[in-house]
């Protein structure tokens, strides 16, 4: 059977491989990856030293490159300008980007070459450079697209250990023409422009590493405007929202043991008239399990309610097990990360029942009021929802099918059916 995945075309999706057990396998793999599990079995990265004569030796541990994190991309570049190659490494389940600085002294026994095509392509991709030094020939070809998710520098760096003089420098350009640039100084950086025959010296790059400073303090909260709003199931809206209020809603997840939660609720209570005047319904949803003798409800009435203006009161609801399971799946879907639900956390739901903004951590009332006006009551166009200037010209569809399958796996049949219906509607629109 041909290899395929749930992201293949609709024609391929009719393949017998797309059975419940097959889809469940894909979902389990995705959950493992989202939870930080290793894709490659925690294999260490490997580095080999070329000894010449087709012999290599494993120097992974000695060079400090044998990280056990899942490496995904690597790029080489003389980052510090000292004549040897340094490495940038991108990992999937570790630090996003890491610099490995080569601290072996090059002692000026190198040559750095940058190419510029005139008749050939400007970047001279495909050109081959030959360096003749001390009776030996060193050859490198300028290539692009040879790394997975990465691209090394287009500066060709020749390590010429033991050489005392460069006799000649030649370039075979992509068009087939061979050009001689004569002798150049050892330990220099040069630019070779096609058709000139002259090696132009480039200035040495100054490198002054910034002193290590203290790590920046992480923000207390994160605000995420959804690129594509997410509809909330009708059944859940009936459970949580007042039927006589037609404006925006803020679902606020909190717990009695969470001090930032209590402070945030107090802020909402003190500004309840202004929030209600903007057409916002506050819906606190308490995560603490209700047990015999639990003081949760009385805690809210004793601590939060006295801070409210009685003209616009709001009440806290206790989250049941089904609702907890739904929000765990929902957060996993929205932020692609498994684990306990963060508190405090809030979801701004617009007047149409769509989740528009996600708040991880406390949200200031001033910011909330602005978002209610921009997204809750008159949702901003999807085309301009970006952290950068510009406008989107294509949609970003939600994975309703995947969300439905995850909800079904948690036993939430009604909510699963809701998103499966949305998925089928989207498929019909595509046809």
Image: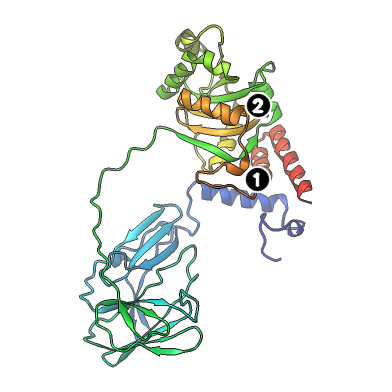
Q: Position of residue 137 (x, y in %)?
A: 34, 89
Sequence-earlier tag: 1 or 2: 2
What colour scheme was applied to this rendering of the protein?
Answer: rainbow
**Residue at position x 66%, y 57% from top?**
5
Residue highlighted by disc 1: 399
Disc marking residue 351: 2
Marks 1 and 2, Cα distance to the nearest angstrom?
22 Å
- Front one among 286 and 138: 138
At label 1, counting other C-alpha atoms closer than 10 Å, the crowd grade (few under 14, some 14-19, many 20 or more) is few
- Front one among 369 and 319: 369
CB under 8 Å between callouts 1 and 2? no
**Residue at position x 46%, y 13% from top?**
270
Q: Position of residue 160 (x, y in %)?
A: 27, 81
Which element type, helix, strand or loop, lies under badge 2? loop
Q: Is residue 408 left or right of residue 373?
A: right
Using the rendered view, name the quadrant where residue 138 is placed.
bottom left
**Residue at position x 42%, y 85% from top?**
195
Give the quadrant of the N terminus: bottom right
- Residue 26 lies, with reference to residue 51, above or below; the image says above
Which element type, helix, strand or loop, lies under badge 1? loop
**Does the image show residue 291?**
no
Point out the frontmost of discs 1 and 2.
Answer: 2
- Residue 330 lies, with reference to residue 145, above or below; the image says above
**Residue at position x 27%, y 66% from top?**
205
Disc marking residue 145: none
Using the rendered view, name the quadrant where residue 277 is placed.
top right
**Does the image show residue 153?**
yes
Q: Position of residue 176 (x, y in %)?
A: 49, 88
Q: Residue furthest bottom?
A: 135
Q: Position of residue 58 (x, y in %)?
A: 34, 72
């Amino acid at each position: 059977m041909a290899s395929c995945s749930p992201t293949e075309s609709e024609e391929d999706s009719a393949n017998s491989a797309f059975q419940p057990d097959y889809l469940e396998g894909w979902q389990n793999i995705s959950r493992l990856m989202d939870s930080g599990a290793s894709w490659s079995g925690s294999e260490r990265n490997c580095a080999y030293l070329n000894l010449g004569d087709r012999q290599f030796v494993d120097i992974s541990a000695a060079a400090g490159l044998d990280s056990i994190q899942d490496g995904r991309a690597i790029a080489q570049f003389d980052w510090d300008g000292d004549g040897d190659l340094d490495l940038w490494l991108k990992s999937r389940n570790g630090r996003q980007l890491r610099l490995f600085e080569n601290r072996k002294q090059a002692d000026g026994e190198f040559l750095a070459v940058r190419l510029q095509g005139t008749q050939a392509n400007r970047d001279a991709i495909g050109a081959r450079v030959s360096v003749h030094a001390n009776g030996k020939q060193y050859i490198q070809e300028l290539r692009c697209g040879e790394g997975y998710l990465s691209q090394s520098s287009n500066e060709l760096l020749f390590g010429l250990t033991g050489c005392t003089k460069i006799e000649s420098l030649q370039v075979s350009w992509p068009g087939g023409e061979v050009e001689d640039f004569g002798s150049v100084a050892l330990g220099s950086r040069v630019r070779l422009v096609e058709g000139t025959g002259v090696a132009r010296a480039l200035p040495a790059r100054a490198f002054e590493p910034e002193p290590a400073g203290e790590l920046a303090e992480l923000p207390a909260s994160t605000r995420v405007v959804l690129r594509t709003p997410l509809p909330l199931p009708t059944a859940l809206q009936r459970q949580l929202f007042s039927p006589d209020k037609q404006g925006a809603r803020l679902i606020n997840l909190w717990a009695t043991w969470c001090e930032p939660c209590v402070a945030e609720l107090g802020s909402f209570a003190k500004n309840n008239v202004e929030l209600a005047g903007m057409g916002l319904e506050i819906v606190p949803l308490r995560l603490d399990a209700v047990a015999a003798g639990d003081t949760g409800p009385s805690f809210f009435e004793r601590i939060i309610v006295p801070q409210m203006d009685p003209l616009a009161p709001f009440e806290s609801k206790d989250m049941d097990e089904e609702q907890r399971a739904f929000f765990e799946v929902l957060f996993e879907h929205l932020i692609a990360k498994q684990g306990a639900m963060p508190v405090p956390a809030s979801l701004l739901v617009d007047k149409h029942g769509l989740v528009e903004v996600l708040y991880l951590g406390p949200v200031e009332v001033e910011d909330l009021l602005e978002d209610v006006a921009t997204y809750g009551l008159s949702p901003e166009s999807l085309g301009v929802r970006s952290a950068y200037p510009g406008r989107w010209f294509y949609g970003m569809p939600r994975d309703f099918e995947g969300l439905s399958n995850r909800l079904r796996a948690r036993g939430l049949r009604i909510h699963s059916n809701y998103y499966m219906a949305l998925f089928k509607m989207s498929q019909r629109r595509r046809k």
